[in-house]
Image (cartoon, rainbow, N blue to C red):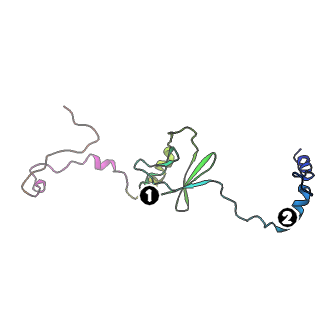
Amino acid sequence: MVEQWDRQDDARRIGSRPKTVAEYFALEQPLLMPLPDEPFETGRVFTPRVDRYGQIPVRTNRYSVPVRLIGKRVRVVLHASHLVVYDQNVEVARHERLIAKGAVRLDRTTIWKSWSASPVPFPAPLLLNRPVRQAGSPRSTMPGGTRRASSTVSGTAPGP
């Protein structure tokens, strides 16, 4: 059907012009340049700053990005159905585009993805139960002659 419509359109005359659409195209075709090798980017580009919650504002909505990017500007390419977030030239997040205004799309895997290779390790369980220096010990005195309070760091709250 599309080929039939093309043939009908080729035979069409625009207004009172002397030649058909196909005849005008035959004159214009040698003047056309070849298409570029690289694909044409159809998305709209934004450069929002990542807020303290690890989110970026795009139009009227918010999307999550890795928390390591807090405070940095990222490049966002907004397409009709999705958006892609880049840090430098590396893709760091991809989300389905939100339709409603004021909506938020949070993806926990995106937010915490960068923490798996974090240089600061999570505290080891052995350190959580280590007692703090006892009051009265020589090293518990702070400058100025004041003494620190005695306490123990543990995973449970103190009892009554």
| Residue 28 magenta | no
Specify which label sits upstream in the sequence, 1 or 2: 2
Q: Quadrant of residue 69?
A: bottom left
The residue that appears at 8% across and 50% down in the rendered structure is 136
- Distance between mark 1 and mark 2 Cα atoms: 49 Å
Disc sitting over residue 28 in the figure: 2
The residue that appears at 26% across and 43% down in the rendered structure is 154
Is 31 or 66 nearer to us in this picture?
Answer: 31
Pair 1/2: label in front: 2
Which SS class for mark 2?
A: helix
The residue that appears at 92% across and 48% down in the rendered structure is 8
The residue that appears at 92% across and 57% down in the rendered structure is 18
Q: Is residue 103 left or right of residue 70?
A: right
Q: Quadrant of the C terminus?
A: top left
Q: Position of residue 6 (x, y in %)?
A: 88, 50
What is the crowding at mark 1: few (fewer than 14 residues within 10 Å), some, or many (at least 20)? few
Question: Which residue is at the far front?
Answer: 16
Q: Quadrant of residue 97?
A: top right
Hey, what amino acid is under mark 1? Lys
Q: Main secondary structure of the magenta part?
A: loop
Q: Is residue 54 left or right of residue 35?
A: left
Q: Which residues are magenta?
A: 121-143
Q: Position of residue 144 (x, y in %)?
A: 7, 57
Q: Position of residue 39 (x, y in %)?
A: 70, 60
Hey, what amino acid is under mark 2? Glu
Disc sitting over residue 72 in the figure: 1
What is the crowding at mark 2: few (fewer than 14 residues within 10 Å), some, or many (at least 20)? few
> Dots 1 and 2: beta carbons under 8 Å?
no
